[in-house]
Image (tube, helix red, strand yellow):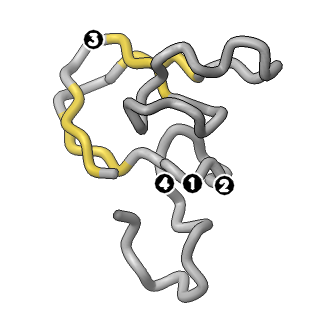
Amino acid sequence: MKVEVKKDEIYTWCACGRSSNQPFCDGSHVGTGLDPLVFEAEEDAELYLCTCKQTRTPPVCDNSHCKDEGEVGV
């Protein structure tokens, strides 16, 4: 999912997949044993954040959800 982040702002990426506010955490992980990933944006940027939770580079999409690695994350 493409999102805009602002330099020095703190973001909380959903790691469990339960959030209704994807790709960000809404607290739905409580009791799952999974914690969200908290990160600070290093610059103003557009990022593709993973929503399938299969990425090897959380929170950023690495196209793990694609069969054809040439596809762009969406």
Q: Residue at x 41, y 37 (%)?
A: 22
Q: Residues within 10 Å of mark 4 (few under 14, many from 20)?
A: many
Q: Badge 3 local density, few (<14 within 10 Å), some, or many (20+)?
A: few
> Horizontal and vertical percent for residue 12?
46, 19
User: Which label's residue is closer to the chain start, 1 or 4?
Assistant: 1
The disc, 4 or 2, on the residue closer to the chain's N-terminal end is 2
Residue 40 lies left or right of residue 37; in this view the side is left
Label 4 near label 3: C-beta < 8 Å?
no
| Type of amino acid under label 1 | Cys
Q: Which mark is residue 54?
A: 2
Q: Are marks 2 and 3 in contact (CB under 8 Å)?
A: no
* Image height of 53 relative to 23, above or below: below
**As shown in the figure, which amino acid type bears the numbered disc 3?**
Asp
Look at mark 1 in the image and give the residue it sits on.
Answer: 52
Check disc 1: other Cα within 10 Å, few if <14, some if 14-19, many if 20+.
Answer: some
Sequence order check: which comes first, mark 2 or mark 3? 3
Residue 56 placement (x, y as % from top left):
67, 51
- Residue mark closest to the camera, 4 vs 2: 2
**Tag shown at residue 4:** none
